[in-house]
Amino acid sequence: MGLTLSSFTSLSIPSASPERPAVMFNIGAPSRTLAAIERTRGFCVHILSGDESGAAIAALFSGENKDPEGPVQRLRGMGYIVTSGDAGRPPCQWLEGPGVLYVLRCRLMQEPSRGLVRVRDHVVVLGEVLELAPQPGPGDPAKLGLIYADRQYREPGRRLGLGGLE
């Protein structure tokens, strides 16, 4: 399961443990991805690079996917590694390969509302970041994250293609 978020925010909660950053985003309901988050109480957030590789991954997970395994199978076919969570941690899968800068492994917060707040036809997801999942190989610390504006993936100064997935 997966989706592309157009809005993802860090969250400051005074009563939260200072060593556990909090994040939030929203998902339209109903959603298979939302159902999986509710069932497992965990999720991963991929911070994608602001280049064609990052834009290609975002495009695969945007829109309505009739086949929930389709994007993951396509990425596996392109040489990406899909890693599953370890025992004792919230279950989620993350991608390793070009276009993935960071992966945040998260669990739903307990409060408010067990981390899920319904607002009309969406659900706000509130999570605690448990760890930054390691990405193999040397990363480029100067690389910027993916930008989405005017319904297009961008890097400063230009529109991005989709790395052969257009």
Image: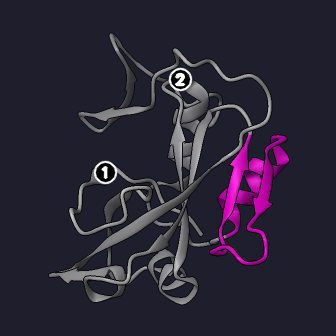
Helix, strand or loop at label 1? It is strand
Occupied quadrant, residue 128: bottom left
Percent coordinates x, y for residue 145 in the rendering: 45, 30
Magenta stretch?
A: 69-96
Magenta segment includes 72: yes
- Which residue matches tag 1? 10
Please tell me which residue lies in front, 123 or 52.
123
Residue at left offset 67%, top offset 74%: 91
Is 46 left, or right, of 34 in this rendering? right
Magenta segment includes 111: no
- Which residue matches tag 2? 51
Cα separation, mark 1 vs mark 2, equals: 23 Å
Residue at left offset 84%, top offset 48%: 77
Q: What's the residue type where badge 1 is placed? A: Ser
Q: What's the residue type where badge 2 is placed? A: Asp
Residue at left offset 51%, top offset 42%: 47
Disc 1 to disc 2: CB gap under 8 Å: no
Is 135 left, or right, of 17 in this rendering? right
Q: Quadrant of the C terminus?
A: top right
Percent coordinates x, y for residue 157 in the rendering: 33, 10
Please tell me which residue lies in front, 165 or 15.
15
Mark before the other along the chain sequence, 1 or 2: 1
Toward the top, the furthest residue is: 157
